[in-house]
Image (cartoon, grey):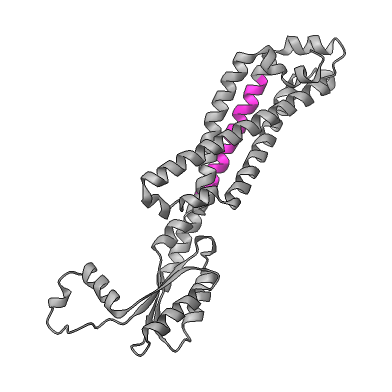
Amino acid sequence: MKENVSLLLIDWRLAGRMTALQSSGRFAILFVIASVFLLFLLSAGAARFITSNYVITALLRESVSGEEAAGLANQIAALSPVRHAEYRDPAASWKEFIRAYPGVESISGVEGNPLPGYIEIRMRHDLFTRSNVNTVISALTPLAQVEKVLAGEESLREVFKVERALNVLFIGGFALLVTLFFVICRLQERIRCSALAGDFEFLMGRGVTEMRIAGLRAAGAAILGGLLAAAAVGVSVVVLNILIKRHPLLVNVVGPREELFSAPTAVSAGVFVLLAALLFVGASLLGWMPLRPTEDR
């Protein structure tokens, strides 16, 4: 038991059943935490849902040709806060209006198509701020081709208030979940150390220092934490991928399936695994320290 490998896996060797049961519980909680983490990461809180419903409309003058309007839409789409800009000609806008208000064409006094063409603009969820919305509005307003810009400015303040409140609630809930998980891990470490106290005293009586035992136990906890966190993230990605595939409307909340496998998501997942490993190390060390003899404290 004096070999490094033996000490690194000492909890599994001496209390394998208890360690396995505790690890199973940790994985279940890590899966929940990883799922919440990925949901917040991909949705940017409430921003993706809000931007899936929020539209800036640039009404065009009647004199603007279709070719000119399409070119203008491409220019607007090039603005950094803009995710998508699409030109709708008068015929398309009239059809949409009729679908929204069936029977309106039969009203007396309505002749032909009274609606102008327009450009529908959608914001990027990760750049959805009041200043970026104002940037897009400011870029549209002076254009000679634009008759009027409809951006719902009167309700934007309330929209951003709701978004901030939801984000605070989401982050607070996530922090509470992580804190609870850490407390559980620390309690598990203390229970396991209490159960193995006699074995640790046996080792220390034969020249194995307390620092070496604590250090190798922490290293083992880091490895276990990293593996469990990586597995939890992997399962979360698979589950979210299946849910988005079966329920396409979730794209408006979580985002497209491709983003689950993008480089930024992979980097964020790596950070999550690293932080989980550090959390396991902290729980291991704090769970070990109260068991030290009184004179060593």
**Which secondary structure is most common in the magenta stretch?**
helix
Residue at the spot x=29%, y=74% of the render? 92
Given residues 262 and 52, the one toward you in this image is 262
Above/below status of 153 relative to 279: below
Q: Return the x and y of residue 213 as percentages of the image width and height.
A: 79, 20
* Tally of numbered discs: 0
Horizontal side of 61 relative to 111 (left or right) equals right
Horizontal side of 85 relative to 79 (left or right) equals left
Residue at the spot x=66%, y=28% of the render? 224
Q: Return the x and y of residue 293 as percentages of the image width and height.
A: 80, 17
Image quarter where the N terminus lies is top right
Residue at the spot x=52%, y=66% of the render? 129
Q: Return the x and y of residue 51 as percentages of the image width and height.
A: 44, 62
Whether residue 72 appears in magenta in the rendering, the answer is: no
Horizontal side of 89 relative to 83 (left or right) equals left
Q: Return the x and y of residue 79 as percentages of the image width and height.
A: 53, 73
Q: Picture quarter containing residue 289?
A: top right
Above/below status of 70 relative to 168: below
The boundaries of the magenta stretch are 170-190
